[in-house]
């Protein structure tokens, strides 16, 4: 005769086995359908710490890539503006050289006025609602000169520049910080100085610079060409420096993207189940569940009362 204790124990063992098999079956089925080992960290066991650390690195890389791409767009706009300043410097020199070649000051000052407007407009370029060359004074136009007369009417030439003195720096990754900002006073100072010299001469006792040039006027304009040469050189250097930074940002973006891909592979190795292994485990869980259910059903068909009742003659 089967004892009550052994029968109860068997029922309990079978019930627990069935419950465990159902849980395993559900978990393996969930892995297959979701493509993930678990929906929470607890399900990753010993690899949970590694997964947390890797996800943290991934989030940081994502932030750096987004910032680098935004910075590339900003540097492109910055390049366009700085190139306009360089062009204005070259065009200003050309205007002076043409006046000398023609021995005439006609149209010289209007040509230089046009180049001032171009340069000032470029240096007051905004990006995302902020002035690019403001040196920390993002809400203030860095160049306060619209007319050639403004260059000599405000006292020291430096007074036309309203930018701060802190050029923007940007962090590209955990260990790389680069100077990405340019100050209007640095980018436009040499050109504005050359233009101010011509404006002061035009408004002085030997001016105006119009009509046939006098010997003194020709001598002055010949001398001022070197100032425009300095402005051209400085402007081109600034454009080149900006290009170097832009290239560094592009290369860093590629590196960061490659790191993102590598990290994604690590995460995938941790979070994605081995489909063949999981399918095998699912099949085993289903078999175990079926076997346990059949045994449990057999026990139910042989009534507990029949097992415990005395044998009848």
Image (spheres, rainbow, N blue to C red):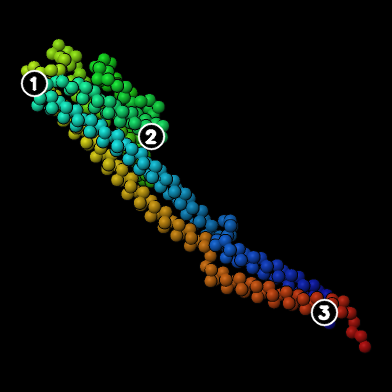
Coordinates of residue 127 in the picture (x, y in percent) = 38, 34
Q: Residues within 10 Å of mark 3 (few under 14, many from 20)?
A: few
Q: Which residue is mark 3?
A: 302
The secondary structure type at the circle numbered 2 is strand
Quadrant of the frame with the C terminus: bottom right
Please say whether residue 228 is visible from this viewpoint.
no
User: How far apart are labels 3 and 1 at the CA level?
Assistant: 124 Å
Q: Which residue is mark 1?
A: 219
The secondary structure type at the circle numbered 1 is helix
Q: Which dot marks residue 180?
A: none
Specify the farthest residue to the left. 215
Coordinates of residue 192 in the picture (x, y in percent) = 23, 24
Say which residue appears at 10% left-offset and 25% top-offset. Answer: 102
Q: Is residue 234 above or below residue 148?
A: below
Examine the image and state in which quarter residue 306 appears.
bottom right
Q: Residues within 10 Å of mark 1 (few under 14, many from 20)?
A: few
Quadrant of the frame with the N terminus: bottom right
Residue closer to the observer: 223 or 63: 223
Q: Earlier in the sequence, mark 1 or mark 2?
A: 2
Specify the farthest residue to the bottom. 313
Specify the farthest residue to the top. 205
Coordinates of residue 281 in the picture (x, y in percent) = 59, 71
The secondary structure type at the circle numbered 3 is loop
Label 3 or label 2, whichever lies nearer to me, is 2
Q: Which residue is mark 2?
A: 127
Examine the image and state in which quarter residue 45 appears.
bottom right
């Amino acid at each position: 005769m089967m004892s009550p204790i052994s029968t109860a124990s068997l029922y309990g063992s079978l019930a627990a086995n069935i419950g465990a098999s159902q849980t395993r079956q559900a978990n393996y089925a969930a892995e297959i359908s979701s493509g993930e080992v678990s929906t929470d960290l607890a399900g990753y066991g010993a690899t949970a710490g590694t997964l947390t650390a890797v996800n943290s690195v991934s989030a940081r890389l994502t932030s750096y890539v987004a910032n680098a791409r935004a910075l590339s767009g900003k540097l492109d706009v910055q390049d366009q503006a700085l190139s306009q300043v360089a062009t204005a410097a070259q065009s200003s020199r050309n205007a002076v050289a043409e006046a000398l070649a023609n021995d005439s000051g006609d149209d010289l000052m209007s040509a230089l006025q046009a180049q001032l407007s171009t340069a000032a407009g470029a240096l007051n370029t905004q990006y995302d609602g902020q002035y690019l060359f403001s040196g920390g004074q993002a809400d203030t136009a860095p160049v306060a000169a619209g007319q050639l007369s403004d260059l000599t009417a405000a006292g020291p030439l430096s007074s036309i520049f309203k930018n701060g003195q802190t050029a923007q720096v940007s962090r590209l990754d955990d260990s790389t910080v680069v100077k990405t900002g340019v100050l209007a006073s640095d980018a436009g100072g040499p050109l504005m100085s050359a233009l101010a010299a011509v404006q002061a001469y035009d408004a002085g006792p030997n001016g105006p610079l119009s009509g046939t040039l006098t010997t003194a006027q020709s001598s002055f304009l010949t001398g001022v060409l070197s100032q425009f040469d300095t402005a051209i050189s400085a402007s081109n250097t600034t454009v080149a420096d900006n290009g170097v930074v832009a290239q560094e940002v592009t290369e860093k973006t590629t590196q960061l993207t490659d790191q993102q891909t590598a990290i994604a592979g690590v995460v995938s190795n941790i979070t994605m189940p081995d489909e063949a292994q999981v399918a095998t485990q699912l099949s085993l869980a289903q078999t175990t569940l079926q076997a346990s259910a059949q045994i449990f059903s057999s026990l139910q068909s042989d009534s507990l009362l029949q097992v415990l009742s005395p044998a009848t003659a």
